[in-house]
Image: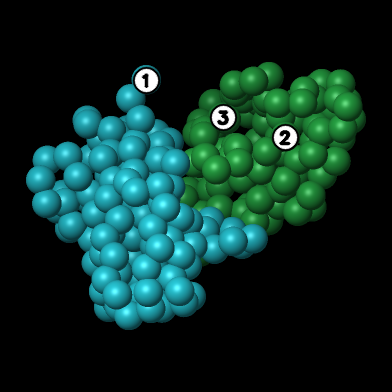
Chain colours: A green, B cyan
Amino acid sequence: AQSVTQLGSHVSVSEGALVLLRCNYSSSVPPYLFWYVQYPNQGLQLLLKYTTGATLVKGINGFEAEFKKSETSFHLTKPSAHMSDAAEYFCAVSDFMGAAGNKLTFGGGTRVLVKP
Amino acid sequence: EPEVTQTPSHQVTQMGQEVILRCVPISNHLYFYWYRQILGQKVEFLVSFYNNEISEKSEIFDDQFSVERPDGSNFTLKIRSTKLEDSAMYFCASRGTGEGSPLHFGNGTRLTVT
């Protein structure tokens, strides 16, 4: 069974400061990892994904994440926060086995507040 | 860019009533999913659907729930007799073929059971 743990349900950062959102996963097979963002009253939008290859992946809006197998982590970062980054962020894991075909298991989410 | 659309955006129903939540997945996608998010809680998997049949379902997806793809474009979630605890945001998602292809989510239907 897969699981995802996001450390910190709320994170507050100042505009221009580093954004760091932590995600640890457990999976019995090599995982596919995703970060999604949810703005108020909207659906889940893909920020970035890791499948294979380069462990540092870049996504939209200046975000990037690094897959570290030894630490079972996939932390999300952005060097400089913008007011528009205020949203809830979800880390998710899937495998490529099973009839479901890449069902996602989500972490609990981290709500980001950006202070001016 | 193609997107997943869900209707209605809000649905209020009385306990015991049947509701149908509708989704139009991205047209060339073959895998379909329903997730739900109870207020303040994590996004939970309900069911996945491929080749006109359920491929996996969670413990939440009991006999009160059913899914259907009645035609070539719609994908529906039916709750036969709603309970108060069914109040949640329900998200439809679809995915194309290819390993690691991501799920694309709709904006959700907020279901309120009174």
At horizontal 11% and vertical 51% (from top left) the residue drawn is B70
Which residue is at the front of the view, A36 or B41? Answer: B41
Q: Is residue A71 above or below residue B112?
A: above
Marks 3 and 1, how far apart at CA: 17 Å
Chain to which the residue tagged by mark 3 belongs: A
At horizontal 76% and vertical 40% (from top left) the residue drawn is A112
Q: Identify the element where label 3 is drawn.
A: strand
Q: Identify the element where label 2 is drawn.
A: loop
Q: Which residue is mark 3?
A: A48
Q: Position of residue B4 (x, y in %)?
A: 34, 36
Q: Is residue A97 above or below residue A37?
A: below
Disc 2 packing (10 Å; few <14; some 14–19; many ≥20): many
Residue type pointed to by label 1:
Glu
Q: Quadrant of residue A20?
A: top right
Confirm whether circles 1 and 2 share one chain.
no
Q: Are marks 2 and 3 in contact (CB under 8 Å)?
A: no
Q: Which residue is mark 2?
A: A86
Looking at the image, can residue B81 be seen?
Answer: yes
Q: Quadrant of residue A65?
A: top right
Q: Position of residue B49 (x, y in %)?
A: 25, 54
Frontmost of labels 2 and 3 is 2
Residue type pointed to by label 2:
Ala
Marks 1 and 2, how far apart at CA: 24 Å
Residue positioned most to the left:
B71
Residue type pointed to by label 3:
Leu
Q: Identify the element where label 1 is drawn.
A: loop
Q: Position of residue B5 (x, y in %)?
A: 33, 38
Using the image, tell me which numbered label, if any, was put on residue B1.
Answer: 1
Marks 2 and 3, how far apart at CA: 17 Å
At horizontal 60% and vertical 41% (from top left) the residue drawn is A40
Q: Quadrant of residue B3?
A: top left
